[in-house]
Image (cartoon, helix red, strand yellow):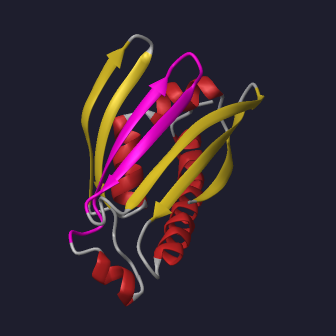
Amino acid sequence: MKERRIEHTYDCSQEVFWGQIFLDETYNRTLFLDELHFESWRVVSSEERGGELHRVVEGVPSLGDLPGTIKRLLSDGAGFSERGVFDRAQQRYRLEVTPRSLTSKLSISGELFTSPLGERSCRRTYIARVEARVFGVGGLIEQRLLDDIERSYAKAATFTNRWISSHGLR
């Protein structure tokens, strides 16, 4: 299993990040469909349970320029289902991703949290964990997924700060 810590600074408070950005469906649809060019993205379910928000999201990212070895392994496509739990008191989001392909051989999980940097700024940290149990190419798959996640999060951070500015959020 490989793990990567990904951090970005946002030009808003933690409260704005969690309350008006991270869980906002319009923001997310614009981010995933228009900015990250996913083939599809949608919230399947969202339910409050005692201070926690439980949600399921489905998405299909574009495959891009994957090596042929990995493309062949993705016979059912690159789609995924994300089961996440947002703990409102601790302002932490834990997630488990179930891919359409390699379901029994690929584990993806993570945790997002924020730290205040001032009244109008916070750091969002994502600890991403990937384990690929595929003989001969497991390490390659883990590295590629973590690199793709890091690139997507960097692009999302730039988009998010533009969104914050253009929507007057601080």
Which residue sits furthest top? 50
Quadrant in which residue 125 is drawn: top right
Side of 131 relative to 44 (left or right):
right
In percent of the image, x 56 and y 71: which residue is there? 143
Side of 35 relative to 116 (left or right):
left
Picture layout, residue 37 above or below residue 9? below
Picture layout, residue 165 above or below residue 170? below
Position in image of residue 98 (x %, y %): 33, 52
Which residue sits furthest front? 135
Side of 1 relative to 45 (left or right):
right
In percent of the image, x 42 and y 30: which residue is there? 85
Q: In this orientation, which residue lies closer to the viewer: 58 or 130? A: 130
In percent of the image, x 38 and y 54: which residue is there? 32
Q: Main secondary structure of the magenta part?
A: strand
Position in image of residue 60 (x %, y %): 29, 60
Q: In this orientation, which residue lies closer to the viewer: 158 or 154? A: 154
Picture layout, residue 114 above or below residue 70? above
In percent of the image, x 38 and y 78: which residue is there? 64
Side of 19 relative to 73 (left or right):
right
Q: In this orientation, which residue lies closer to the viewer: 114 or 33? A: 114
Is 23 magenta? The answer is no
Which residue sits furthest bottom? 68
Position in image of residue 20 (x %, y %): 48, 28
Is 77 magenta? The answer is yes
Q: For the magenta stretch, what is the residue range?
A: 76-100
Which residue sits furthest right? 118
Quadrant in which residue 80 is drawn: bottom left
Q: In this orientation, which residue lies closer to the viewer: 15 or 150? A: 150
Position in image of residue 58 (x %, y %): 27, 48
Picture layout, residue 62 above or below residue 45? below
Quadrant in which residue 1 is drawn: bottom right
